[in-house]
Image (tube, rainbow, N blue to C red):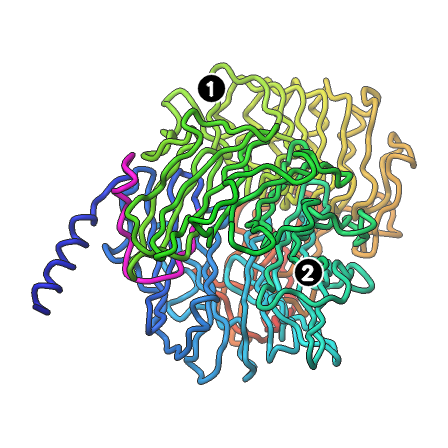
Amino acid sequence: MLKQTIFLKILFIISFGNSQWSEDPSEPIFIGEGIQPQVKATSDGGVYIAWITDGNYHVYLQRLNLNGEIQFNDLGMLISDNPNSSWIAINHINLDVDSEDNAILTTVDQRTGIWEVYAWKISPEGDLVWGEDGIAVTDYGLVNMSPRISILADNSVIVTCTQDDSKVFIQRISSEGNLFFDEGLIIENETQAFIVPQSIKSSYDSFLIQWIGQSPGWPIYSEIFLQKFSLNGEKIWDEPTTVMDSTVLPMGNFSQQLIANLDGNSFSAWTQFSGNVQNAVVQLISEDGDLVWDNEIDLSTNSSHFRMSPKIIASDESHNLIAVWKETNGSQTQRGIVAQKLDESGTRMWNSNGINIVELNSEYDYVDLSPVGFGEDVVVVYMEQSVNMNSDIFAKRIGPEGDFIWESEITTITNSENPKSDLMIGNNDNIVFISWSEGGFIYAHSLREDGILGIPDYQGCSEDEVELWSECYSIDNTTELDLSGNELSGEIPSEIGELVNLNYINLRFNELSGLIPNSICGLTDLINLSLSYNQLSGSIPDEIGNLIHLESLYLQNNELNGTIPSSLGELENLNNLGLFENQLEGIIPQDICTIYQNLDYLGIYSNNLCPPYPDCISEDSIGDQDTSLCEPLINQDESEISLYYLYDAYPNPFNPSTNIKYNLKHDSQVKITIYDQRGRLINKLIDNKEKSGVKSIRWNGKNTKGQSVGSGMYLYRIQAGTFNQTKKLVLIK
């Protein structure tokens, strides 16, 4: 009998091994054996699903493509089989996806004998980028619990957890897998225990941490705190904001949610007692840490009902808030699901008590529910459980007026009527992926925005189109690209240069990083180019002078370095030039005077530009400059300004990178190399011909193979023509 059971189980698994998304709710895709799935969609229409096996708590990951075909091993990719002797692990797996579609996974295990937090990065091809053992986020001999993660614009990862129930621990991991904070950031209080911290990205240069503080003794009084940090780990607010004053939370209901909107504000939601019933409430916190609403807002005025565990989403367009929660009558004999919409002032928009997603009834309970936003609409996925514990999963879509959108009103996700648990969802712009555990196995379905199960309506771009940030643009017919204020992250795709007829590009007020692609300089029809208010780095391409029709160039408020290219003097049609609030350095090229008289606006203040400045430029345009790195150029006669020189690296000592700055008297063949103390070549940073002027390049502490080198002293050397100079720098880890 045992052999027969095993055979049938194997046959069952094989039958689902090459499945595709089905339109039939009775035919979900079999993912693997386990519980507690985590779900995150990818930019190409696919999805990652992570889970833990029941009993030994091993961690697995699977990736499915657009069609629902598995990409890793049939039964999933084993991430960790490290020991874990407690059920606690099953509540502490976290999954997210960065802008390059890498999966970021954290969990806790006891490989050292105590619960420590570990993190993995898995590429779309299934490579363990941070190693087979992952990164030890904590390694301090303390009990670590409740880790949570969020991914920042540069693909670095914030991990937070509690240590010994007395401290909130925070760490930031770079995209390469380096820890930013030597021993982590610690938040503690001698009079409170801290539990369930969570992190979110607040803006391109900050993140938020929310946690619950609990008093000792009985009854347990709780408070919710919120603090804002810079990317360097500095507290932005002098004191944490008390989001929820001291109160007794419902027994075991410590769920709280924190989300951000485009304004830099954030919403926090939780369940608290209101008289003898539980009530779902929400608060709005400003970017400065102030409570916007005088008091938390009750999502419903129905004071006789229990309202529990609100889930919230915010619209990026209207900035309205939508909340969904489980509700019961006063005797808790009837149960249902209710939703409410709030405007920015906290006014209830779907009548005083919200709208019923599921009417109160005595037949079913609703153990899991998750909302996801689609513009101004919301899709609510929920699990309906009968008195005999059998359950099915359903979904509804609600419009901005509280009306049901789909023709059939409700979509059945699965209808096996078997006991289920652990409902989780993930989504793209037009897809919802649903996963759950059933009988010790993980299953999944794909739900399109039209309410139909099956393969997502996402077929990529045609041959005469270019895909940028998951959208398709006609190569021949796209003349304008305005994506300002869209929270775009990662690098600007080089494919943007294929839109050969572009005359207008506006990507300002995003979270873009990396270099300005040279391909943009091939768009010779450009009239307006705005890349301001991002996190772009590197130098301005010399080829910028090819944009002969350019009238406006806005590059301000970035992290651009290097010199101002002399080719700007070739832009005879330029009327507006914004370069302020960067790290531009060296001497302003005299060539800029050829276009200065045509400029209606020039802003180059707040850089590191060195005197003497061209006489043609007004002092107001130059403004304040940091000239601390201009030696030995300052205080020299103009005839002596041009020379060969290698500056002191900054910062020095450094971690993880340092800037190497040098001056070229003439156009020269330049070689910049890194050596260790024994004279062995570590890396070759530059080996090509460069134009005269002040230049710079960064060294990221890696060798020629892209591997991080160890702590110690290194030598950096410049060879430019007959000029040679060597200096020292120190890497500290």
* Residue situated in front as seen by the camera: 11 or 83: 11
Would residue 621 be visible to someone looking at this image? yes
* Spot occupied by residue 715 in the image (x, y as percentages of width and height): 59, 68
Quarter of the image for residue 465 reads top left
Task: Please identify the quadrant where the C terminus is shown.
Answer: bottom right
Q: Which residues are magenta?
A: 22-40
Mark 2 or mark 1: whose residue is earlier in sequence = 2
Per the model, the C-alpha gap separating discs 2 and 1 is 60 Å
Mark 2 secondary-structure assignment: loop
Quarter of the image for residue 36 reads bottom left
* Residue situated in front as seen by the camera: 628 or 218: 218
Quarter of the image for residue 548 reads top right
* Residue situated in front as seen by the camera: 1 or 541: 1
Q: Are marks 2 and 1 in contact (CB under 8 Å)?
A: no
Q: Which residue is mark 2?
A: 276
Give me the residue at 56% from left, 82% from top: 142
* Spot occupied by residue 452 in the image (x, y as percentages of width and height): 37, 31
The three-letter amino acid code for the residue at tag 2 is Asn
Does 492 sit left or right of 266 as displayed? left
Does 229 sit left or right of 482 as displayed? right
Task: Please identify the quadrant where the N terminus is shown.
Answer: bottom left
* Residue situated in front as seen by the camera: 277 or 3: 277
User: Does the magenta segment cover residue 36?
Assistant: yes
Nearer the viewer's eye, disc 2 or disc 1?
Answer: 2
Would residue 101 be visible to someone looking at this image? no
Give me the residue at 63% from left, 32% from top: 507
